[in-house]
Image (cartoon, rainbow, N blue to C red):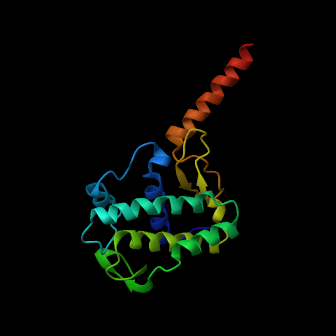
Amino acid sequence: MTFSHDVEHSLEVVVDLVNSDPLASGSEGLPDVGSLRSFIDLYKISDLPTVTETDLRAVRALRPRLREVFEAGTTAEAAALVNGLLDGARVCPRLTDHDGYDWHTHYFAPGAAPAEHLLIDAGMALTFVVVAGEQERLQVCSAPDCGRVLVDLSRNRSKRYCDSRTCGNRLHVAAYRERQRAAAV
């Protein structure tokens, strides 16, 4: 199953937003308003001209709620969590072709605050994943000392680590060394 470019982009934003939480990475990934502005600019999140301390607090509060969807044990649980995220949100679907991108759908209301904008984009992307029956693609890294989340978009659903160069490699090296020790005995 492949998702549209917009959904995959929104999922990437969700993953990085959740992983900016100290619970995931051990350090605050959004320490100040400037870092939130940089996050918004990095992902080319449109229609957010200003960012305030209030916005930063609201975005930080959103992260654990999004994380719960990745930790859901069943599709029904994930669906209930996504519905809870979107409950009361001002969803306002409209077509747009801004900044050189082809026509695509925005779901947030014009003038939405950053947290509301991110919540709705995330909620809609997660909705598409759940509706497609692909909820198991939303995962927490399999490395025992890592709390980061990931979306497995591989064809064979084999992604287990947030980063194969760090978490995956570290575990593979540890397993190799254990096999070497066992063979030497």
- Pinpoint residue 157: horizontal percent, then vertical percent: 65, 56
Residue at 58 percent of width and 75 percent of height: 83
Residue at 54 percent of width and 46 percent of height: 147
Residue 5 lies left or right of residue 151; in this view the side is left
Using the rendered view, name the quadrant where residue 39 is placed: bottom left
**In the picture, which quadrant includes the C terminus?**
top right
Residue at 70 percent of width and 64 percent of height: 74
Q: Nearer the viewer, residue 177 or 76?
A: 76
Against 105, residue 115 (above or below) is above
Using the rendered view, name the quadrant where residue 61 is placed: bottom left
Residue at 38 percent of width and 82 percent of height: 109
**In the picture, which quadrant includes the N terminus?**
bottom right
Q: Nearer the viewer, residue 155 or 144?
A: 144
- Pinpoint residue 131: horizontal percent, then vertical percent: 63, 75
- Pinpoint residue 87: horizontal percent, then vertical percent: 53, 78
Against 165, residue 122 (above or below) is below
Against 107, residue 63 (above or below) is above
